[in-house]
Image (cartoon, coloured by chain):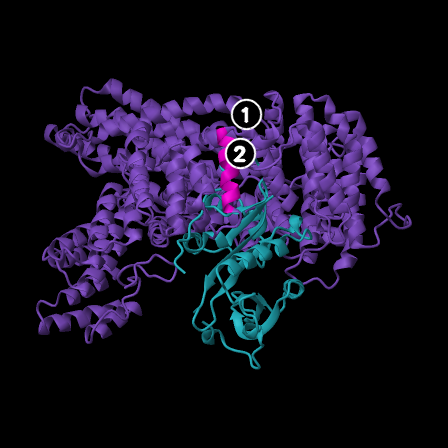
Amino acid sequence: MTVQLTRSAAEPGQDTTTIKGLWVKPVDIHGDYLDNGNNKKAIQQGDKLLKKHKDLHCAKVLKAIGLQRTGKQDEAFILAQEVATLEPTDDNSLQALTILYREMHRPELVTKLYEAAVKKVPLSEEYHSHLFMAYARVGEYKKMQQAGMALYKIVPKNPYYFWSVMSLVMQAISAQDERLAQTMFLPLAERMVEKMVKEEKIEAEAEVQLYFMILERLGKCVEALEVIRGPLGEKLTSELQSRENKCMMLYRRLQRWPECNALAHKLLLRNPDDWQFYPSYFDSLFHLMDQSWSPPKEDEHCSEGSVHHTVAEVVRFVEERIKGEDSKECRPLRGPHLARLELMHRLRERGCPEESLLGEPLELMVQFFGKFGDKPCCITDLKLYLHLLAPEQHVQFINHLSEAVPLGERGEEGFAFPDDTKALQRHLCVCQLSRALGLHHSLDVDGKLLLITELKAHYRHGLKFGMNALKTELQFSDMYCLMAAHVYIDLWTETGDEDMAWRCLGLLQEGLSHSPSNAQFKLLMLLLYCRLGAFEPVVDLYSSLDAKHVQHDTIGFLLTRYAESLGQFAAASQSCNFSLRFFHSNQKDTSEYIIQAYKYGAFEKIPEFIALRNRLNQSLHFAQVRTERMLLDLFLEADIVLSLEESVKAMSLSAEEDDIPWDNMRDNRDLTVFTSWDPKERQLTDEHRRRSLEDEIVWLRIRSLTLRLVASLAALGHVPSQQNSEMINENGVADKPSVHSSLLSQLNQTLQTAAQMAEQRVQRPFLGPPSTRLASALSSGSCQCQAAALQLSVHLQELETAGLDDSSELQTQICNGFKSLAVQLREILTKCKGDLLEMKEAKLQTQPSLLENLIFFVETACIVLWMASYCSKILRPLKTSLQRKKKKKKDANMAMPAVVCGFQELTGSLQDLLTQAQEHIKGQESGTTALKLASLTLEGNTQDEASFMKAAMDKVQSSYLRSLQEVGDLLKKRAETVKNLKI
Amino acid sequence: MSVFLCEVKAHRAAAKMTTLRPFTCDDLFKFNNINLDPLTETYGIPFYLQYLAHWPEYFIVAEAPGGELMGYIMGKAEGSVAREEWHGHVTALSVAPEFRRLGLAAKLMEMLEEISERKGGFFVDLFVRVSNNVAVNMYKRLGYSVYRTVIEYYSASNGEPDEDAYDMRKALSRDTEKKSIIPLPHPVRPEDIE
């Protein structure tokens, strides 16, 4: 076995990811069955073997794996523990148990297994290293440190020693108390490495890396610098420019500006396009100026070479680099040109008069455009420096640039077009810059429409350059199309004229027909459809983006924000599932690679992998899909397929448990995924992001509390409350009613915060993060109604204790609650009334908010019905005992208690409301179907444009019908459940 | 070759203007503009972590002055030294649409070749769809030639036929006679390649 941790070395021992190849016959066949997924056969085979050899441990474990994989976890666990308690030391059993425990997500049991094994076989290098890895899987850093040293004592190989050192670093990183890290763990790690250095035992690059990591974390920059620049540093060869990069970082931290400056310009001489060194170069200059630094006498030169300490020198250096690029035969690099603008920006920031040495910003930018205007990234580069122009220069700037764009003769429409793709790119860049300078936004409606006409003309003209493009390639002129779409959106949001949205969708549809893999077209269409209330077309668009894995976390919100709220429940479940599947695999996946990083000595990556795991586990989106998926399941199935109690149990949902990391929530959404050339003041700001995250968290809190309250309602219904009050758990867990009321008060508090937040809503850019459902949930009244329903259950518990006699006041209170619920629910339904889709003056008009309100109505109705079901459970026995009393007294005239009458009234109202809602949906279905979209003339559009627009309208119509159908189906099922409320 | 493979987040203190730097896990959350391209595969997290754990120096990302990711290259070193098959392999190379035509892919390839030179590789190789003319021509310009065709290397999911790949190679200085790039006369099947 090789333990040299080179890349060809395997984990000490064997690869345990597959069972094949580990076994002697006949166990071999058995292993094969497992590997091929034939678990039943594997169990049978295991039984057969066990008959012959009663104590064949690994056969037992293999059987257990079969059981585990066929869903018999409990049996599997018992069987496995039979073997584990014998503390096996044979390879086969140990490895099979490792596999089993990993599949059971019980990695901590693997550590126990190998702890026992090394006790029995104390000199086994293999078992010790398995033990180390088992600790690594569960992050037991202290034990890893000891296991590493134990290994090194048995077999003195460097990697084992450094595993132990790294485990100390991990203890430092994970220490709650930073002082402990700085005064104990890291100094100890440092001493351990120093010992090896002194004994001249350092062998590998990874060991030097780790040494550097330790010194850096200790803030011992001088020592770190010595290591890097000394003989040990010579081992750093894998990563390109590794030593230079590290030196630069250390010079900066040490504020050794002369060295920083000298090294930066030395590296820039070598590669004038390497951006990372320009900031160091410029920063060091300013620091030297601030210190009035002057060069020392000749023999005391800075160790990195000569220093540029005046603006003039630096300007000269940058200009020389530019000259160098300009005189080159091959492709000039844009770095030095951009560096000049960066220098100007920094000089201006400092108020340096020497800015003028560089020239006029407008002139420099025109020059930059002249050289790089035909590159697609020219806009990305220049937009960083547009602020250097005075506002009154904007138009002049654009005119200047336009002069440098070669266009052909003006055609019939009055537009002149480029003759080749380079000219096209230049022209496009001017358009992008105009937009970035706000020149599009200052146009009036007619001006914008004219601009759109021009952009569309350029788009269509440019298609001729890409006649032979593959389906996977973009068209040269695609960005004109996207920009025209952006101007349409400007018009839509400013004037509210929905026709602009339809035209925009039509145009993007046209764009997609020529450029079927353009992700930006798809993303924007997706957003537009959602804003118009249509989720159905989004499913195909998103799936054609082929977003996978981590992309579910970064852009999955585009789906999950809208699917449920627009009434497409099946698609909503599926969207949540995509994301959940990704998140659930994360925990297991990452620990595997943390171990790999130990094996290959990629020590820097270990904290990075752990940070990644946390980032995913703490993802906002993860918490959202977890919560929404469960709510959705309950809305769709609880009390329909299974009872609410059974449903809650099936999803192991507990009211007491809150698994959302509220204080460490990570917003992993990629909010820059939409291309935009908007001017700075219209772009997404950090403040927007912060507010958006705040919104998301408050909304999530409401949803999560609602979910847990529903779970708590189910628990209340499950156990008769007489027993309940005595059931205060010995473990100090509060009893169920008090959990319920604590959750209720949290919900009410959150609703108050939410109401305050909703008041101070800010407009976010169209392409920014979508707003949550919070504001509409509050204005529809659904939040308040749901909270009121959940609140009522508290009074019902009181009634249960008090009984029907002597509780008239309480009964009146409950009856008022019933009445109020019916009124509130009716109000929500009223807010759903109106036509979702209608044709007005030959135009199509949507009202997506009506659809959203309808979903709020459905969700709220579900909760009210669950509450009613709970009421019925309490009232039924009370009523029965009352009737018994009546019979005894032979008093047929005794009046029905108020609460019973009130409840019957409530169920009547619910029945009535659900019927009304279904009728409303039927009406909408026939109304929407009856719309003759084909009869729309869509004046002002070409025939092609009109047909693309109609295609989009058809999709929206079809989507509305589907939503109505899904909502209608659910309401029908819910209406059925009202029958069960008879008491 | 007894080398640990490890690297350092080189620019913790550096400003936003970094260009070429090691790829880190956080970049997974920012690479949509590159990966929403139809020919760029988004792999599962384990795949990236495997590369970051084994060959971190071979996973390089380019970042624009404004902080946008421009493109990245992901590669590894593999093969037997004794059989003169030790080589650098390009697993993925992709540049976002707006940062194309800057020579960035060529720069990233040059870096991968340099790393492979340092490791004493005999050649660098890569697989590319035969239909991807743009890429095939770029690799040819960079000195790569078709070593063999791999039949149905790319499986299609949407009912379209599977696609062949070119296995393209470029000899490094250690392969003085350029033996490693002599083209095979016949195409091979995916199961025949190591």
Q: Is residue B9 left or right of residue A388?
A: left
Residue depicted at 33% across the width and 29% down the height: A178
Mark 2 highlights which residue?
Answer: A771
Q: What's under tag 1, amino acid-wise?
A: Arg
Percent of width and height locating residue A810? 25, 20
Percent of width and height locating residue B123? 54, 67
Relative to B155, residue A953 above or below = above
Please report contact status of discs 1 and 2: CB closer than 8 Å, yes or no: yes
Q: Name the chief secondary structure element in magenta.
A: helix
Q: Which contiguous range is marked in magenta?
A: A242-254
**Chain in cyan on the image:** B
Residue depicted at 71% across the width and 41% down the height: A321
In terms of depth relative to the viewer, which is nearer, A801 or A53?
A53
Q: What's under tag 2, amino acid-wise?
A: Ser
Residue depicted at 84% across the width and 45% down the height: A405
Mark 1 → mark 2, Cα distance in angstroms: 10 Å
**Which chain letter matches label 2?**
A
Sort mark 2 into few (<14), some (14-19) or many (20+) by Cα contacts within 10 Å.
some
Q: Is residue A246 magenta?
A: yes
Question: What color was chain A assigned in the picture?
Answer: purple
Secondary structure of residue under mark 1:
loop
**Which chain letter matches label 1?**
A
Sequence-earlier tag: 1 or 2:
1
For residue A761, the mark is 1
Percent of width and height locating residue B181? 57, 73
